[in-house]
Amino acid sequence: MEITDLLASEAVVASLKVQSKKQLLQELSERAAKLTGLPERRILEVLTERERLGSTGMGQGIAIPHGRLAGLPKIVGLFVRLEAPIAYEAVDNQPVDLVFLLLAPQDAGADHLKALARVSRLLRNQATCEKLRLAAKPEVLFALLTEKTNGHGAQAA
C-alpha cells in the first residue's frame, strides 16, 4: 500500500489555522465530507469517538486521526499542516502541527491497519517531517508525502 493510494493531491492543505483539537477535527470533517460525499457530522462523530479511546497524537508534533465509516468505498486520506501547533493530548504532550487524517470503509479490516502503518512509517521519518514543516505549497507537500513511494524506501529488504 502506497501513500498515493490513500492521498489525492487536492487532499493536501498547506496552512490551516485552528485554535484547538476540537476545531481541527471539525475542519478535517468538513474537508473530508467534500472529498467523500459523506455527511460532515458523521465523520466528526467517528473521529471524536476514536479520540475518546485515546489520543491519535503519536508524538513529535504528529497526529493521525482515523476512523471507519459505513458507505465509504475506499480508504481516503487528508494531510494538513497547521499554521501554528496546537495542544492535542499527544503521547509526548507536545503540540501537533502535522496531521494525516485516514478514513476507511467499515469493513476495511487489515487494509485500514496497513494504511495506518504506512502513514505512521512515513511520518516517523524525522527528515521528511522537517521538509513538510518547511514546505509552503500544497503541491510541494504532496510531492514530499508521495516521493518515498517512487522506488526507494518502499520495498522491504
Image: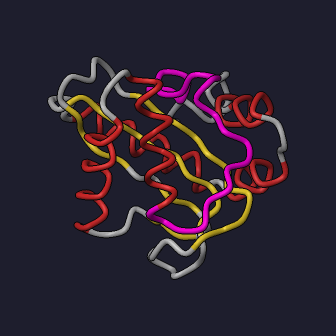
Judge left or right: residue 103 versus residue 42: right
Coordinates of residue 131 in the picture (x, y in percent): 80, 49
**Is 92 in front, or is 23?**
23
Residue at the top extreme, as displayed: 73
Query: Whole-percent x and y of residue 73?
Result: 28, 17
> Residue 155, how many percent across, how many down?
54, 30
> Does 23 appear in magenta?
no
- Residue located 67% across and 68% down the image: 85
- In reply to whether residue 15 is colored magenta, the answer given is yes
Q: Position of residue 138 (x, y in %)?
A: 75, 33
> Residue at left 41%, top 40%?
102
- Residue 40 sits in quarter: top left
Vertical arrangement, residue 75 with respect to residue 40, above or below: above
Front position in the image: 138 or 62: 138
Instruction: Give above or below for 144 relative to 85.
Output: above
Q: Is residue 58 left or right of residue 141?
A: left
Name the image quarter holding residue 11.
Answer: top right
- Residue at image position (62%, 23%) is 10
Which region of the structure is painted magenta? 1-22
Instruction: Identify the residue at the far bottom of this view.
Output: 93
- Residue located at (53% from left, 27% from top): 7
Whether residue 77 is situated above or below residue 88 in the rendered picture? above
Relative to residue 18, is residue 67 depicted above or below? above
In the image, 49 versus 109, the foreground residue is 49
